[in-house]
Amino acid sequence: MAKANELELDLVEISPKANPPVCKIIDYKKFLYEQKKREKAMKAKATKVIVKEIRFGPQTDDHDYAFKKRHAEKFLKDGAKLKAYVFFKGRSIVYKDQGEILLLRLAQELEELGKVEQMPKLEGKRMTMFIAPKTKK
């Protein structure tokens, strides 16, 4: 304590449970500032997961499918997750199998760009499938 007072710095207890307790003489305000700065840098480096959505109908035509597939490829190349879903309107819920075939076809064609995170699953009027981008080496 005397040494810390002499240097006009703070005595900070690092490990109180050790025998004897470990203390360090530092400028506490500067320590807090640097710690905050490190945390901010870590937060900036953390990757944010972006989820892009693509909507199909159960009877989506080949041209429309190809158009949406190109968008899906672009999203996966950019590193975003893809949420592809088939929306069943009214009585089109009868064509559940067509919707599943459409999503599985999309997954198969995007196999080299991403891996299926969740297989097609029916939730209410939507059949949803998630595709995550493959990590770059």
Image (cartoon, helix red, strand yellow):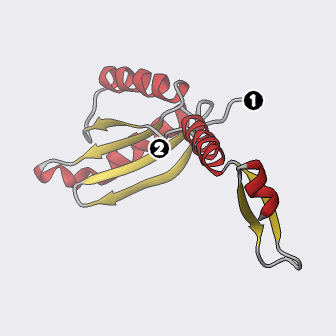
Q: Secondary structure at mark 1?
A: loop
Which residue is denoted by mark 2 in the rendering? 104
Which comes before the other along the chain, label 2 or label 1? Answer: 2
Query: What secondary structure is found at the residue carrying circle 2?
Result: helix
Compared to 77, does 47 lie above or below? below
Name the quadrant of the N terminus.
bottom right
* In the image: residue 130, left or right of residue 19: left
Quadrant of the frame with the C terminus: top right
Q: Does residue 67 sit above or below 131 in this rendering? A: above
Q: Residue at x 44, y 37 (%)?
A: 50
3D distance between C-alphas at marks 2 and 1 = 26 Å
Q: Residue furthest left?
A: 90
Asked whether 4 or 121 is in front, the reply is 4
- Amino acid type indicated by mark 1: Lys
Give the percent coordinates (x, y) of residue 46.
Answer: 57, 40
Q: At 47% across and 43% down in the image, what residue appears?
A: 104
Kindly indicate the quadrant of the structure image that contains residue 21: bottom right
* The quarter of the displayed image where residue 132 is located: top right
**Residue 35, x across and y down, in percent:** 63, 46
Occupied quadrant, residue 18:
bottom right
Instruction: Work out whether residue 19 or residue 25 is closer to the camera in this orientation and state it.
Output: 25
Of 82 and 23, which appears nearest the observer? 23
Q: Is residue 2 above or below residue 26?
A: below
Q: Which mark, residue 137?
A: 1
Give the mark toward the camera: 2 or 1. 1
Q: Is residue 117 left or right of residue 55?
A: right
- Please tell me which residue lies in front, 38 or 60: 38
Q: Indicate the position of residue 37 as horizontal and vertical percent values.
A: 59, 39
The residue carrying pointer 2 sits among few (fewer than 14), some (14 to 19) or many (20 or more) residues within 10 Å by Cα, namely some
